[in-house]
Amino acid sequence: MSAPAMTYLSLSTSVPAVTRRRSITILVLGLLAVAVGVLAPSSSAGAASRTKALEAETMTLTAGAGQVIKDTSASGGAGLLIWSDGSGTGALDVRSAASSLAITARGARCEGSPRMRIAVDDVAVAEVTVDATTWRTYTIKTSLKVGARRVKVRFINDHRTASCDRNLFLDVLAAGATTTSTTSSTTTTAAPTSTTTSTTTSTITTTTTTTAPTTTTTTVPAEVDPLAGERLHVSWSPATAAADEIRATNPADAARLDLLADTPTARWFGEWSGNITIAADGYVAEATRAGALPVLVTYMIPGRDCGSYSAGGAGSADAYRTWIRDLAAGIGSREAVVILEPDALAMADCLSDALEAERYQLLAEAIDVLEAGAGTTVYLDAGHAHWLGVDQLVARLRLAGVDDARGISLNVSNFGVTDAQVAYATAVADRLGTHAVIDTGRNGNGSDGTWCNPLGRAIGTFPTTDPATPPVIDALLWVKVPGESDGTCNGGPPAGQYWAEYAIDLVRNAGY
């Protein structure tokens, strides 16, 4: 038996970890059980020892993002290698309630160490930097209830250069009662086939040819950024069809359209989506298969756009409530970001007092319904930096229940420069503690004061979930599809229709 398996047994496992070696006698099994009982610092630690460990090589991998590897220094002689922002998911059999989760891992460094995000039952509980290049046990404080707990470990900061490749390796996961208990372990040189185990009143001594992993205690962050390190989903884009039409005659502009098609961009959902449960399920399932994070935009609020170019939406408050519930059902427990109702909050003053109050109520209810999804993160749209004053926006956000959302979205379908949106988001965060995402799809040249198909605009910063901005900003996204018309203004087609010439100009004006 390898050193990691024996050492891990002393922390949190008993017979199940030992039975991999049929040659170990019943007497040795009994001595090990006694030793674990002696070492337990409290009754709760003893309870944790009755919990079966989860071998990483048995976890379900993101397709094409890792593989099981042989490793004589790992528990059971095997481990899990994860690359390309992949994840491993498995069921941890928790037989006694525990207050920590221990993960034995190591990393391949490349201009920095790998980081892993851990979720239990689809709720993110910690992010950990795996700074060890040999097996080390990272202990995370989190509550584990009795039963089969779904544990997901995602590699969130993939990186590669011509000379190195950053990757994450997992060995074994187990529940533990505390985050501070340790076990004395002595490693000496011996023949590979010789394993001797003895017990005393206070220690287990393991003789093997490998080095036992150390234990690191990790404090769970007060707040986990649900988007950090996520790879955003790239789906079908109307830019693809537009590029194919001109590829033979105008390859330069076709390449500009290809750039748009290859960039992660949000998918909008409204009355054109048909059965919203089926539509949302199909899009989220596509992203899940790709190991990526989908961004959905709801655009169905009654009285949408105050009857202007994008008028429409649900016919009544109850119809909207049903639509939101059906959309949430399509997302299910899978990971997704929802941008909730662009312009609905900023344009609320076009409504009667009764309808304005109804709008705030509908937005608050929608947040509750969507955030109930285990993997759904909601950002309530808040206009942009030059629309509402901070005090006015904060008042409306409170009425719309923003405290139950992750935060706000800014600059959706607009052209304001990113720095102004960051300052605005920071001012709001100082009052409400919210986070924000910013639409940068068309703000490369800023705004000229025109909101409807202004000329001379350019694509902005490409989408990223690791923006070099203050912590209040979770991501820079392309929410409005670059090239979709704002309405029949400045020569554009009806709102929402794809305008290839405008799309090409956005890319060309950005210098591509």
Image: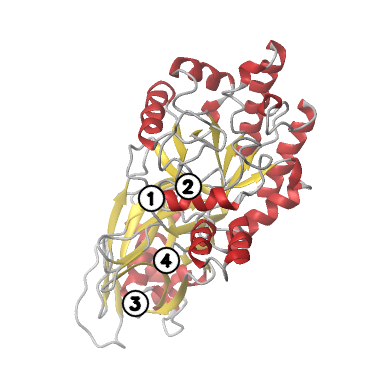
Going from N to C along the chain, the mark reached first, 3 or 2, is: 3
Pointers 1 and 4 in contact (C-beta within 8 Å): no
398 in relation to 280, above or below: above
Camera-side residue of 411 and 425: 411
Residue type marked 1: Glu
Q: Position of residue 478 (x, y in %)?
A: 50, 46
Going from N to C along the chain, the mark reached first, 4 or 2, is: 2
Q: Residues within 10 Å of mark 2 (few under 14, many from 20)?
A: some
Going from N to C along the chain, the mark reached first, 1 or 3, is: 3
The residue under label 4 is: 172
Residue type marked 3: Ser
Q: Which mark is residue 127?
A: 1
Q: Is residue 273 left or right of residue 367?
A: right
Q: Residues within 10 Å of mark 3 (few under 14, many from 20)?
A: many
Q: Marks 1 and 3, how far apart in space?
A: 28 Å
The residue under label 2 is: 124
Q: Marks 3 and 4, how far apart in space?
A: 13 Å
